[in-house]
Amino acid sequence: MARLSVLMLASCYFIFHADAVLAQNAAPPASGATQFDPKPSAQRTGNLGATADELLRGQSKVDVNAGTVTIITNRVLGGPIMTSILDLSALLDAGERFEKMRVIPMVARGKMQNLWDILYLRGVDMGFVQTDSLEYLKDDPSINSIRERLRYIALMFPEEIHIIARSDIGSLEDLAGKKVGINAKGTGSSLTGPIILRRLGIDAHVEYEDANIALERMRTGDLAATVYVLGKPAVPVAQIKGAGFHILPIPYARFQDLYLPSTFTSKEYPNLIPEGEEVQTIAVGNLLAVYNWPEGSERYKKVARFTDAFFSRFSELLKPGFHPAWKQVNLAATVQGWKRFKPAQEWIDAYTKDPLRTQFDAFLKQKGISGDSKTMFEDFLGWRTRSGNNSE
């Protein structure tokens, strides 16, 4: 109940803050350009050692902002992505008033909008974007520029693709020529839905429609299906009532380069899946992404400091009190087609050269196990993270 109250209060502030920042409507500079800083240059003097009294007198005003980073998320309150930022804030925020580290969540429309906000919205340091975003934009004339201006810090929680259809739609192929809702513009569903249909060669009429309105249109026969991208079991999907709806299976074999395999069970969605049955689906990864700031710039250094704090204290997020989805995160995991933020890669490189890696390689040699030791070590780190077996 306390967590829900915090989420509701936080949501009101986040939406107000995001609207205020939107009004500024300015883009970060391209790599190598003069860095934008909304503060007058006279205020960018000072150091992290300023006292509260100095700050109250107007001295070293930059210290108020030096340790603050913003992370833009989506509107699914209580979901792992939103909760993860609250977890990071609870873990990393230091101090009561003028912190050396402070994490501020910002709520936006969805993860496709987050990508544009990271690129163009003033005040955004990081944000969650889906791993299939570049695939969606592959035909965009500016795709190479977009790719070079984005970096990722870590691969975060996967979310399943739910395609809810009317009972007369037996398969994805039956959606050809039909209307399909893909949620509002800027959401994760609005980019993943078209990718799936395009990959399968299904010529459906996709429409941007809020999920709740889409369900009502399905009940009247106006829409054949609607797409959700949410971690299972998703409360909005589990709450769908009334006969005539079911979840369509998605063949993983056609999407192995982009997505992960997953399944839905009747226990997760008893209103949509017959008792004892399962439905095959796929899941999309989420990246904690950052703008590719010029190395050494103030924004670069702020995010680098956050990255070091996040990675160094990651094991604490696996303890009770934080969201259980943290156990799904492997900090060393790589993502095809994306480049990692340099400080994050340097931290991982240093970690994988520690005595643990040396012991792991010695173990493989002793057992006569051959193969890609780096990949096997990353798999080992993933197992170690998921199992919570991080004791030294």
Image: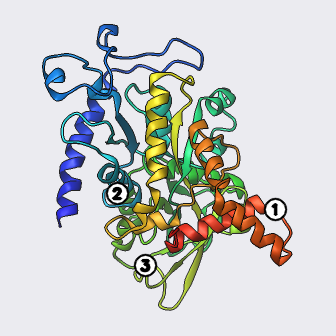
Helix, strand, or loop for circle 2? helix
Residue appearing at x 22%, y 62% in the figure: 3
Residue appearing at x 34%, y 33% in the figure: 67
Q: Residues within 10 Å of mark 2 (few under 14, many from 20)?
A: many
Find disc 2 in the rendering and name its residue.
83
For badge 3, the amino acid type reads Tyr
Residue mark closest to the camera, 1 vs 3 = 1
Compared across the picture, whether 136 is left or right of 235 comes to: right
Q: Which mark is residue 269?
A: 3
Residue appearing at x 17%, y 21% in the figure: 54
| The N terminus: image quadrant | bottom left
Q: Residues within 10 Å of mark 3 (few under 14, many from 20)?
A: many
Out of 218 and 46, give the one closest to the viewer.
46
- Residue 357 location in percent, x, y? 68, 61
Answer with mark 1 or mark 3, whichever residue precedes in sequence.
Answer: 3
Helix, strand, or loop for circle 1? loop
Residue mark closest to the camera, 2 vs 1 = 1
Residue mark closest to the camera, 3 vs 2 = 2
Out of 387 and 190, give the one closest to the viewer.
387
Find disc 1 in the rendering and name its residue.
372
